[in-house]
Image (spheres, rainbow, N blue to C red):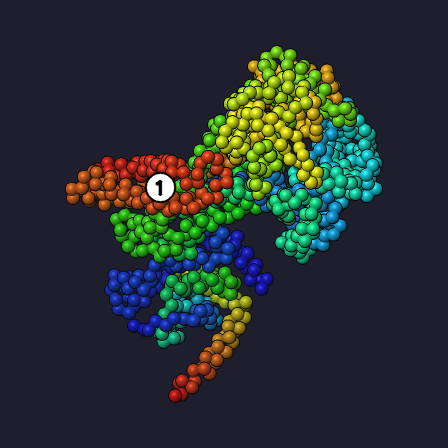
Amino acid sequence: MIGEWLNRLRFLFFRRKPEALDDELQFHLDLSVERNIAAGMTADEARRQALIEFGGVERTREQCHGQRPGWWMGTVAQDVRYALRGFRRNPVFTIAVIATLAVGIGATAAVFSVVDRVLFRSLPYAHDDRLVSVGLVQSLEKQEFTLGGFFFEWRDNQKPFESMTFETGYGDCNLTDGNPVHLHCIHVAQNFLPTLGVSLAAGRNFTPEEDLPNGARVAMISDGLWLSRFNRDPGAVDKDIDLDGHATRIVGVLPKDFEMPRLQEVDILRPAQMNVAQQHTVNGGIGYPLWAFARVKSGLSLAEARAEMEPLFLHTQQWIPAEIRKEFHLRVRSIRDRQMQDAYRAAWVLLGAVFAVLLIACANVASLFSARGAARQRELAVRSALGASRGRLIRQSLTEAFLLAAAGAVAGCAMAGILLRIFMAIAPTGVPFLAAARLDLRIVLFAVVVSMACAALFGILPALEKPHAAALAARQAKSGAHARLRRVLVAAQIGLCVVLLSGASLLVRSFWNLENQDLGMQTRNVITVHVPLNWEHYPTGTVDFHLRAEAALRHLPGVTAVGMSDSLPPDGWHDAIRLSDLDVQGSPRAPASDAGYSVWRRVTPDYFRALQIPIVEGRNFTEEERGLDKHLAILSRGLAARLFPGGNAIGKLIERWEFNPYRKAGPVFTVVGVAGDVKNGGLGGEDQPEFYELRTSVQTGYWDSHHFFILESSLPASVIAPWIRSRVAQLDPTAPVEIDTMKQAVSRLADRPRFETALLGFFAFCGLLMAVIGLYGVIAFVAAQRTQEIGVRMALGATRMDILRLIAAEGLRMIALGGAVGLGVSLAAAQLLRSMLFNVGPHDPVTYAAVLGLLGVVALAATLIPARAAMKVEPVVALRYE
Amino acid sequence: MPVQIDLLQGTLDLLILQTLAAGPMHGWGVAQRIQQMSKDVLQIGQGSLYPALHRLEYKGWIRADWGLSENNRKARFYRLTATGRKQLDTELKNWERLSAAIGLVLTPAVQS
């Protein structure tokens, strides 16, 4: 056995001289001739018979050669050399294939790397598939939340969860040692991190004692704060930091990848120190708002967990006032679902687009290979006749396909890296986790394998077919049976292209609508200023500070109006009220089932001036009224039309109902004016009616914690910002100042649609480019194949127009077929886009007409160029063409 | 014209080994010898002969050396190696078992 292997090894390195075999065969032939002469034939006849008996020499040579162990290794090198030579002879084919693969692989890998982080990433919690968000939903708040009065009842009586925990939402605190810094502080239950299954980078979790009311002041800090403040020094644990003027002990450091289940920014976690008994008395007897999370017991599905929670929910519903009880529903969903929201839809659309591009790329490679294969039929026939076996031909084709696919894969990886960088540069901050996206090796591998498979499949198809002896004799290669396959491939590419293009065009149109809509207010010269104050410094309230700051800002050069508000349009937090809780005096109340709501904003008279919101009826508030203890209101045009369908709203009285927990009399507002509608439900959202309450200096409330100055300024923000800072610092040197321009804020809102539109547009462009290359290639190939036929036709009297028609008709058929199928598919697929579109229907006829028009023109051009070339063929040249 | 008979897979190797067992021989000689011994039933064309010879050589069962033929020409002479002889024994045994087995199956048919 070993001897046999040694023997093989010997032959692997010491080749036999090829002439030896020739000598041997010659000797064999000579002996046959001699034998025939001995049998009495003439010399010529003897030689002839011997040759006939002998048969083909080349085949024998190949077969003898094929017996050598390790023989195929030599042929690989030979195949590679041959393939490279072929590529050099045919650079257009080579470049087209490599470029197609590069775009296909690059785009797929880059987008999947992004989408993977959004759709399929694992959350930084242990066994994150069993973590759920539990809470109530209602018309004013579509994201589940809960209330102290409910939560503790649920926590103590629930069965489906291993544990339940909560956080108290967004919180501000200021780091007050040295430069004041505004931090995100969140209060959490003691079992918050254990329930999520998060282990700390350093230190320990809160103790149950620290979570009791009036417990010790302790905090856990984020990795970011640990780095910026302590340079990741493990000694930071047990140090004190000043939070809002109080020494607070750091007990732990959160891991680097920590994130809140609702993805709020977080710098500091503090124990909630919740007074459980109090939760049935505070906030109208329903307790403080909380956001609850739980870990489902193993073996229990989400639906089962929800079903088990339902009776508890129904029991606690008694705390909700009877009038609105029906509006509340229980929701239990995975944390992942809660985080993703509408990002799912966008991610799937992108994924679909990228697979369409990959498909187009594959179809393109396939049709390129197929065309090349058809052109090489004669070459294959010759090689076969010279003794190449079928296996050998297939191996040769595979070598070529793999070489090209490998080159395409390398180019594709480079492309993916570049694209990913571009995506991250243009992506808005609002797309979760994009900054952490890395090129996903699995998907690179996947794309490479797919394109290799498709190159291999279509590369060997022509070789699989038994080479016809006819192909040798034919005066020119026949386009053969693959012509139909190629046409189908090109039509499929055009179809996919229609889908991509129409999707992209819808998004572009939608984006244009979004950017160019009338917001109902000016954004150009508006600067917003937010000053998060340290409440402990203002035991008697912040009204005085705000008034002094307002006066100071009014004296800045270039500032023409300084308004104040508790919230800002067109998006972000704002107060709201159910329409059914607005009681127009002297007219029947709206039915309680009316689920509509109105935005509620508390503003000063200059709010309307600074934002240039027109008062269309009645009058604006006056400066004097700010000092009076009166409830005055301005309604948006939409709200006025809703509450007073018949007529004049001015002077009417509206009572705001309040619940504590049962209905009690609320303030009665006098309507003084009606203002123009302003975009207030986000850029793409539906406009809501809006109720403006005069923000007086007399009444105060919890809304004081939400406070923005709105400046109309003729100077740019960069000039005026330092002055604003210094004026505020004169009033309170510990207060951080956040300055933004309205224009930037609005533009940020459009970041996400801009990103989606840019990506889809890019894919549509890639797809169109590839499909057009494919179409051009096939038509040019067909025209070249039929050159001789064209010559014959012209010799028989066909005009040049007939020839043009003949060739162009071929292309038109593919365009028409692909276009029709693509149109059908995109009309169906556009439904997916519906939620991403703004002011344009998914079946917008203008868009589809434009897409088909564009595709038709480009595709026609790709057809006509080679068709015209065919038309100009000289009949005499064509007839001699070989 | 003799009837063309397809050789069983591997049978050609056995025939070549058996032929060479008689002594070194060149390719043409092997073909002629097989033809004679089989009374012209088995004609081995060069197309299958030489690949087989090469195969056996690569396996180390036979060796080839240049020598002079009976009419004083340079020719490659093949001879059995020690492993080749052992291989021949095994293959012969296998063949006997195979033909005996086939015989057993076919005997009733022949008798009837």
Residue A699 drawn at (x, y percent): 69, 25
> Which amino acid does the dot numbered 1 rest on?
Leu
- Asked whether B47 or A22 is in front, the reply is B47
- Residue at numbered disc 1: A775
Q: Residue B6, image x and y in percent?
A: 38, 71
Q: Residue at x 44, y 36 (%)?
A: A840
Which residue is painted at 48% across and 75% down in the image?
A: B95
Residue at image position (59%, 12%) is: A558
Residue at the image point whose x is 50% and y is 48% from the top: A449
Which quadrant, please, contains the C terminus of chain B? bottom left
Q: Nearer the viewer, residue A463 or A302?
A: A302
The chain that hosts pointer 1 is: A
Q: Is residue A587 depicted above or below B50 in this figure?
A: above
Image coordinates of residue A413 in percent, x first then y, are 53, 40
Q: Is residue A722 visible?
A: no
> Which residue is situated farthest in the front direction here?
A586
Q: Secondary structure at mark 1?
A: helix
Looking at the picture, does residue A313 appear above or below residue B72? above
Circle count: 1
Q: Is residue A562 left or right of residue A838?
A: right
